[in-house]
């Protein structure tokens, strides 16, 4: 009986049935895999579509104010004050840019004041930042870590809290309505010192020891070795400091609001564009804002990679 059953199990018909079942199971598995892959593809497309849709909406939200600024600068005053806003000018008025330069705003003087404050404060701030970061990165002295921790703790305090005490201090010094009051109070930046210190600490200490063996002074080592190696971070600090000086408003408005020392952000206020009737020429004001924005836009456009590189290199170790 057993031999008969075994003979039946190995017959060609049985083998053919088994092969058909295997083929069917393979086909079913392939169909299941195709269904899963199609679902994954559909989910991937849906996620990508949702992501790009979200990014597109956010880009429109971010860019729309700049677009509105541009089109408003070439509108007529009547069209700008119209109850129904227009997304494209009905009539272009390029004279607003001429008014921004030749009117009471005196845009050229504001540019000069801002450049003087920005360049001088940036140079002096770089000197203070480099020397401070070098001291914290390479020198050993008592209380170094405690002092550096105390400096970092000041970053937790909003700068606006120092406005009143700083104003009282500079008033007692007689610095009001001078370039000094716009430059000196902001020469030290704890964030820039921290940023550069982290970059300096990435430079191998063996270079410093080898330089000391050769009789190189600390300042020469700083100038010949550390500054060239930390050039990306220094470029980032320079750009950020210039942009900060260009964009500062509250402090210059408080301590130097006269035309001889007024900065460009303060000069863009509405009273600079009022006519005899007291109405503000908003298109001319928007044109002035466009002119002021272009330098910052160009700086970021051409130097953004240095900013990113300097910040990323400073955050590797520390």
Image: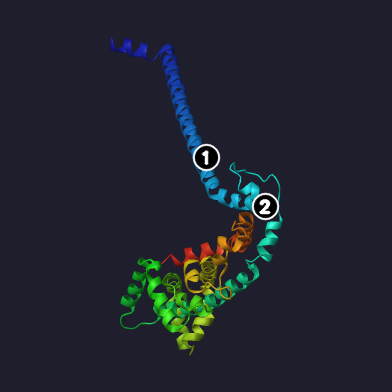
The residue most toward the front is 277
- Where is residue 48 drawn, in percent x and y? 50, 39
* Residue of label 2: 74
Q: Can you tell which mark lies on residue 254?
A: none
Q: Where in the figure is residue 297, as x and y percent of width and height?
A: 60, 60
Q: Quadrant of the C terminus?
A: bottom left
Q: Is residue 125 visible?
A: no
Can residue 201 be seen?
Answer: yes
Question: Which picture quadrant has residue 160?
Answer: bottom left
Question: Is residue 78 positioned above or below 101 on the image?
Answer: above
164 or 37: nearer the viewer: 164
Task: Give the answer, above or below, for where 227 lies relative to 293.
Answer: below
Dot 2 surroundings within 10 Å: few (below 14), some, or many (20 or more)? many
Residue 78 x, y percent position in the rendering: 65, 48
Q: CA distance from mark 1 to mark 2?
A: 31 Å
| Residue drawn at x 47%, y 37% as measured from the top left | 47
Q: Check disc 1: other Cα within 10 Å, few if <14, some if 14-19, many if 20+.
A: few
Q: Nearer the viewer, residue 36 or 232?
A: 232
Work out which quarter of the rendered image holds the N terminus and state it. Answer: top left
User: To which residue does mark 1 refer?
Assistant: 53
Q: Which callout, 1 or 2, points to the residue nearer the camera?
A: 2
Q: Image point 48% across, 65% down: which residue?
A: 311
Secondary structure of the residue carrying tag 1 is: helix
């Amino acid at each position: 009986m057993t031999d008969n059953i075994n003979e039946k199990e190995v017959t060609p018909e049985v083998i053919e049935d088994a092969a058909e079942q295997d083929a069917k199971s393979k086909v079913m598995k392939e169909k299941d895999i195709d269904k899963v892959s199609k679902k994954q593809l559909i989910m991937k497309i849906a996620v990508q579509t949702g992501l790009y849709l979200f990014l597109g909406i956010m880009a429109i939200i971010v860019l729309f104010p700049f677009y509105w600024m541009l089109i408003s600068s070439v509108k007529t005053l009547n069209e700008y004050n119209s109850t129904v806003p227009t997304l494209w000018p009905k009539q272009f008025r390029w004279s607003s840019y001429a008014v921004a330069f030749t009117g009471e705003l005196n845009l050229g003087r504001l540019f000069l004041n801002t450049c003087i404050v920005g360049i001088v404060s940036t140079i002096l701030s770089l000197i203070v930042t480099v020397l401070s970061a070098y001291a914290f990165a390479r020198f050993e002295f008592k209380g170094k870590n405690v002092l550096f921790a105390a400096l970092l703790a000041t970053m937790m305090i909003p700068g606006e809290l120092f406005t009143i005490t700083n104003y009282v201090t500079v008033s007692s010094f007689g610095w009001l309505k001078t370039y000094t009051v716009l430059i000196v109070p902001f020469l030290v930046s704890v964030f820039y010192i921290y940023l550069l210190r982290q970059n300096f600490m990435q430079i191998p200490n063996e270079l410093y020891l080898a330089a000391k063996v050769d009789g190189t002074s600390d300042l020469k080592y700083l100038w010949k070795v550390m500054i060239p190696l930390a050039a990306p971070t220094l470029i980032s600090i320079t750009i950020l400091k210039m942009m900060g000086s260009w964009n500062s408003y509250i402090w210059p408005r408080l301590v130097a609001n006269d035309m001889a020392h007024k900065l460009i952000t303060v000069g863009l206020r509405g009273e600079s564009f009022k006519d005899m009737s007291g109405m503000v020429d908003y298109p001319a004001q928007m044109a002035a804002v466009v002119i002021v924005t272009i330098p910052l836009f160009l700086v970021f456009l051409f130097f953004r990679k240095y900013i990113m590189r300097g910040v990323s290199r400073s955050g590797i170790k520390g």
